Structures are given as structure tokens and as C-alpha cells.
Image: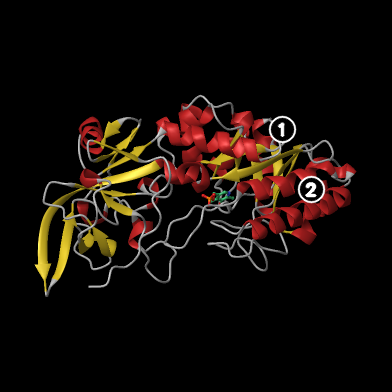
Amino acid sequence: MKPKPMGPIPSGYAAIDGELAIGGRTASELVEIAGRTPCFVYSKVHLDQRVSDLRSAMPERLGINYAVKANPFAPVIEHMAGLVDGFDIASAGELEMVKAAGIDPARVSFAGPGKRDEELEAAISAGVTLNCESEGEAHRALGIAERIGKAPRIAIRVNPDFELKGSGMKMGGGAKPFGVDADRVPALAREVISAGAEWRGLHIFTGSQALNPEALIEAQSNVLNCAARLASDIGAPLHKLNMGGGFGIPYFSGDAPLDITAIGGALGERFEALPDSLAATDLCIELGRYLVGEAGVYLTRIVDRKESHGVTYLITDGGLHHQLAASGNFGTVVRRNYPVAIATRFGTSPEEVANVVGCLCTPLDRLADNAYLPIADVGELVAVFCAGAYGASASPANFLGQGPAAEILV
Ligand SMILES: *Cc1c(COP(=O)(O)O)cnc(C)c1O
């Protein structure tokens, strides 16, 4: 069987006693701490390193926000609170999570195309900035604010006329459920301001999971041009411009890490020559997977090893119910292998081609196809890397009655 390539194992993972180690502990020790398999292990060292590398590459003026939906595990949110400037949430549930982490609501903004009245009220009461996604939503927010007697903090999410090229998920350009079409933003902004809202500024998100620095540089440049034009049409300064994110991580064979030095350099040049309308604006980017994706590993135990028509299967106690994206069922057309390793034989030379599958009764439940791996037995541990974002919270944990994986931050 010809092996199918796997994605690159992120940097910063070493072996201790022949096992994958995270934060100085072996995979077996980590499973003991977590109490069971499958489990997600998130690494503080990786989170710290990622944010510090990013800060060194980006202009000092640029704020960094964390998009909570990428990984809402409470200890991760609490840890990120000491690292990033702001938090982007997408529901009242995430609002509760950032409040529970003790994060000042003034650092939080709330985007999402279907905010319910109760969610708007909770956000306005807390003092969170609403990134309004439509005229209708802005009107509902103003009505709720008047009823509860509190000025809402309002920004407008713009549906721009451009998009992030090569982006995994397109969220700008043409008809979209997200944001207000750019040409209608000035009128709505003026209305919101004259209704007595606290005017915060604009949010322009253009896409996700881009690995091409040129595409990100172009998108950021377009965002700044668009914001400057809208700000002068509105006739009021922007306190804040959330420039979106889109920084990707390498998941698959052939993917290379993003060149953040190039992006930071280009952004620095733009910041040197900002138009007057943006001169005093707080500028930030919002990132999810780039901050947390490579800091997480999913550990699952091999419960059976079998052959079928000459093909070897390593059957694990995990699967797509925790790792929908790695299984290839979350926004991909062709299934490709994430980086996967035998955690209990980390650094050992590969000797066989095997299929790593989950425990669910569906052929969709695959973790690695035709992976070239060291020979592993029942009881050993498999690691799926790049599991820090859109894993635990973006997979159908209750499918087939399996329930959630354990999660730990070390
Ligand atoms: C999902 C989302 C993000 C985070 O995306 P990543 O690809 O994880 O960086 C940021 N902003 C908005 C508006 C989003 O919807």
C-alpha cells in the first residue's frame, strides 16, 4: 500500500523516553492527568510562544484579539486573557465564558449574524461592543438599549466588496449573511450615532485559513482603504477598526507555515502612512486557529488492531466526534491527512502503512489514511496534531452516545 502523506508536525514537540512529550510530560503521563482517553492536551508554552512571535513580527500598534470560538476551553480562555488584547465572541454562551474568565467586557466584541434579543440585551448590559451585522439588528439593539436605559456600544461589521484570496472559508465579497454591504454602512453608522449609541467603529473580516502572505497583505491593504473611505463618508472618527484575521496554519502535506514577518513588515509600512481618518484609530486583528491550533494535540488509544483484505487498521477510542476537521468532514472537499503520530513511539522510524480510524460505526470516521507509522499495538496512543482549534467544540461529541473528550491545559 502506497503511503499517503501527512501534514507537518508543528514545531516544539519533542520526545521523552520515546514518547511524545508536551510541557515536559509524556503522552502516557498526560493521559493519566486527563483521567481518560480520548483527551485534548493544550500547551501553555506553545500559546505563549505563538503570541510572542506574533507580537515581534507585527507593528507594535496592532492589537491582537482572540476569536474564542476556535477554542473555548475555560483554562485556555483564562490563559489567553494574559496574552492578547481583546476577545471576539459569537454568542451569549461565549459571553458567559469570557465573563467567567474574569475578562473585562470592554475588551470584548460580539459578532455573529443571528444574535437573539436576549443575547443583544446581555451584551449591551455587560458593556460589550456589538459588531452589528444588519440594519435590522442595529435597530433591535437600539430598541433594547433604550428599554434598559444603557447606551449600547456599537460597531458595524462590513461586508466588503473584496475577499481574502485562497482563504479556506470565504466570508466577504458579494452576497453574504455576514455584515452590512459596504455602500450601506455610512447611512447606518450615522443613524446609530445620532440615536445616541457609543460609536465604536468597523469590523471587516475577509476570510480564514490563508497561508499565502501576499493574499493577507492584499486583504489588509484593502481593509484599510475600505475603512478609510467609510470613515470619511460617515464623518466621524473610528475608535476601533477590527481588520479581521485569516492567518492559517499548516494542516496538510505541502503546507508551509505563514510568513508573518512579511505580513508584519507590509502592515508596518501601511501604518506609517495612514490617512487622517484612521490616524487615531485602535487597529487590531482577530485570530482563532493561528493562536491556538498548533498548541493542541488529541490523544486517543488504540483499542483494536486488525487486517482486512491486506489492509491494516488501527482502531482507536476517538474519532470524528471530537475531530470532525481531521476526519475530513468539516469544510473540505478532498480528504487529506492531518499530522498524526504514534505518541508512544514518537521519533521511532515508520515501518508499516496503516489506516487510523475512530470507533464510530461510519466509514466517515477516519483519522489517517494509509499513514506510514511505527508498528503500534493495542493500548498504545495515537496523537493527532493541529487539534487546538475547532476540535472539541466544533465536533459532534454526542454522536453515537460517545460524549466529550477530556481536555487539559499544561
Ligand atoms: C471564525 C472567525 C474568526 C476566527 O477564524 P480563524 O480561522 O480561527 O482565525 C475570526 N473572526 C470572525 C468574524 C470569525 O467568524
* Residue name at image x 69 percent, y 55 percent: 217
Is 308 or 136 nearer to us in this picture? Answer: 308
| Image quarter (top left, top right, bottom left or bottom right) of the C terminus | top left
How far across and how far down the image is residue 367, in percent?
A: 28, 59
Assign a secondary structure to mark 1: loop
Name the mark on residue 189: 2
| Residue occupying the point 53% across, 53% down | 248
Q: Which residue is mark 1?
A: 151
In the rendering, at what x and y percent does residue 227 appear?
79, 51
Residue 26 to residue 388: above or below: above
Task: Give whichever of 109, 117 is nearer the camera.
Answer: 109
Residue name at image x 79 percent, y 43 percent: 271
- Give the left or right position of residue 27, taking residue 277 as reference: left
Q: CA distance from mark 1 to mark 2?
A: 15 Å
The numbered mark at residue 138 is none
Residue 140 seen in this snapshot: no
The residue mark sitting in front, 1 or 2, is: 2
